[in-house]
Amino acid sequence: MELGTINQVRAKRDSIREKIKSLNLNDQDSETNGNENEDTFKRIIAGIEELLTDISTLT
């Protein structure tokens, strides 16, 4: 039996993945973020994708 909360987490995860697919990562190549400008947009997205993979494992 799956809980409603788990289904909601999976739905949100899938929604985030679809939004990431629609991004044009090449437009943001020169931008950096963070206190020391160490993080590129692609690197931040990669981190988010890793978190989504972790969520998939847990649900």
Image (cartoon, rainbow, N blue to C red):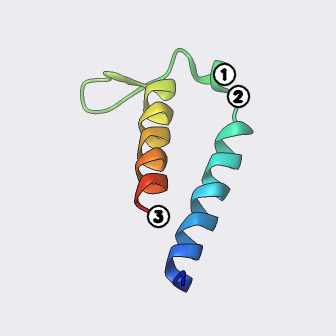
The residue positioned farthest toward the right in the image shown: 22
Residue occupying the point 53% across, 69% down: 9
Query: Which is nearer the eye, 35 or 39?
Result: 39
The dot on residue 27 is: 1
Residue that numbered label 3 is attached to: 59
The answer to whether the residue labelled 3 contacts the one labelled 2, judged by CB atoms less than 8 Å apart, is no
Q: Earlier in the sequence, mark 3 or mark 1?
A: 1
What residue is shown at x 63% (from left), y 66% (from top)? 11
Check disc 1: other Cα within 10 Å, few if <14, some if 14-19, many if 20+: few
Label 2 element class = loop
How far separated are the C-alphas under marks 3 and 1?
33 Å
Determine the CA span between mark 1 and mark 2. Answer: 6 Å
Look at the picture and state if 14 lies above or below 18: below
Is tag 3's residue or tag 2's residue first in the polypeptide sequence? 2
Question: At x 25% / y 24%, what residue is drawn?
Answer: 36
Kind of residue indicated by mark 3: Thr
12 vs 37, left or right, is right
Looking at this view, name the residue that lies furthest to the top: 30
Cβ–Cβ below 8 Å for labels 1 and 2?
Answer: yes
* Residue 37 horizontal/vertical position (percent): 32, 23
**Mark 2 neighbour density, 10 Å: few (under 14) some (14–19) many (20 or more):** few
Q: Nearer the viewer, mark 3 or mark 1?
A: 3
Q: Residue furthest front?
A: 1
What is the secondary structure assignment of the residue under circle 1?
Answer: helix
Position of the N terminus, as image quadrant, is: bottom right
Horizontal side of 8 relative to 32 (left or right) equals: right
Residue 58 vs 32, above or below: the answer is below
Above or below, 17 relative to 3: above
**Residue at the extreme left of the image, as rendered:** 36
Q: Which mark is residue 24?
A: 2
**Type of residue at label 1?**
Asp
| Quadrant in the picture for residue 29 | top right
